[in-house]
Image (spheres, rainbow, N blue to C red):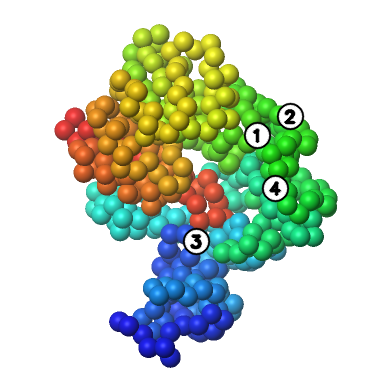
Amino acid sequence: MELNAQERLKIGEVIQVEIGPVAHGGHFVARHNNQVIFVRHGITGEIAKIKITAVTSKIAHADVIEVITPASTRVIPPCSYAGKCGGCDFQHVQIDRQREFKRNIILEQFLRIGKIDLLQMGFDLKVEAIEPLDGLHWRTRMEFAVSNGGRIGFYGARSNDVVEINDCLIADSRMNVSILANRTWKSDARVEVAVSSTGEVSVVRSGRSISGPTQLIEQVGGSSLKISPNAFWQSHKLAPTTLVEAVISRLEIKKSDHICDLYSGVGLFTSAIVNEISDLGFLTLIESDKTAVADARKIFANRMNVKILQGLVAQQLSIVKRADLIVLDPPRTGAGEVVVKQMVKFKPRKIIYVACDPAALARDSKTLLDLGYKLDHISGYDLFPMTQHIECVAGFSPANG
């Protein structure tokens, strides 16, 4: 229904609403005069006053400024910057309830985008809690912006303004963020900090190492990987082992399998898979990032049955001749129809999809189902507590297999 000028919401306007269901992106849905409003810092069922921060022709955005009737799962955020910096979305929500919301997001995205009803299909979907269970001090990779005053911080939500911080409660405590926060930095700098599983700490300013090793040693299972601090690596301290175990346990590897590791990064999954195959088996890694590829080539230099292709997956996959099994861990945008169609041409026995965005996973899952594959399992992992992000692992096999 078209609203007249008087009924439309305006930036800065304060209204009272009932907070509705959680939405993908760290928001909750509310409605006012038939307009949809995406609200930050609320909880489903609350009555709250909200302030409109942005308006488009279809939706508005708002922040909660006063909670009139709080939810029973509302808590005092542990961090004083919650609601100000753009890093965390759910610090005001009790941690178990956060996981329930994330479960709801996965279900909603699959139903809306993929037209897949996971509950009707019989999946007992859970978002598993991962240590530390309080959701703090888990993040081993951090990138800080620098304010005009030379202090580190994070961009506020939907803003280019830097919120200066003195500490970050989701950062691994070995980063010593409070020490970095007391330094003065050039205002155009970008400060990146990485902590390895072996306790090494690297600090990089605008692409140049200023302290710590230029190669970090990461130990996952029985493997030791030497990687560049700026190469992609899972940010939660337990994510590498959690995801490797999830992938290996469901891949059903045979000794002679030819396996593709797509969007492979430095080869996290390959480091475990390579020990499961014989000399008759073969692994092909495809990765576009030059730094990650350089690291992978060193890591697997002595493995004659590992081939590494640098480039876009959609282009390099055409070179591959055989793929009995496929593992993929694409960026937030997902694999996309072109890559999914290429994967299916190999008729792999199993496809294990690791996803950091349930929307992209839902879209690609629909494509896989349309092309004759079935969803065997799907699990969620709370590897980004206090934030709206969710990690999923889904498995597919031929529907007629």
Disc 1: CA contacts within 10 A as few (<14), some (14-19) or many (>=20)? many
Q: Which residue is found at the position 73% from the left and 42% from the top? A: 205
**Disc nearer the start of the sequence (2/1):** 2
Q: Are marks 3 and 2 in contact (CB under 8 Å)?
A: no
- Residue 264 in view in this figure: no
Q: Nearer the viewer, residue 188 or 172?
A: 188
Q: Nearer the viewer, residue 160 or 214?
A: 160
Residue 190, disc: 4
Disc 3: which residue: 26
Disc 1: which residue: 229
**Disc nearer the start of the sequence (4/3):** 3
**378 above or below 1?**
above
Q: Nearer the viewer, residue 188 or 138?
A: 188
Q: Are marks 2 and 1 in contact (CB under 8 Å)?
A: yes
Q: Could you give the CA–CA distance between mark 1 and mark 4, rounded to whole angstroms?
A: 14 Å
Disc 2: which residue: 213
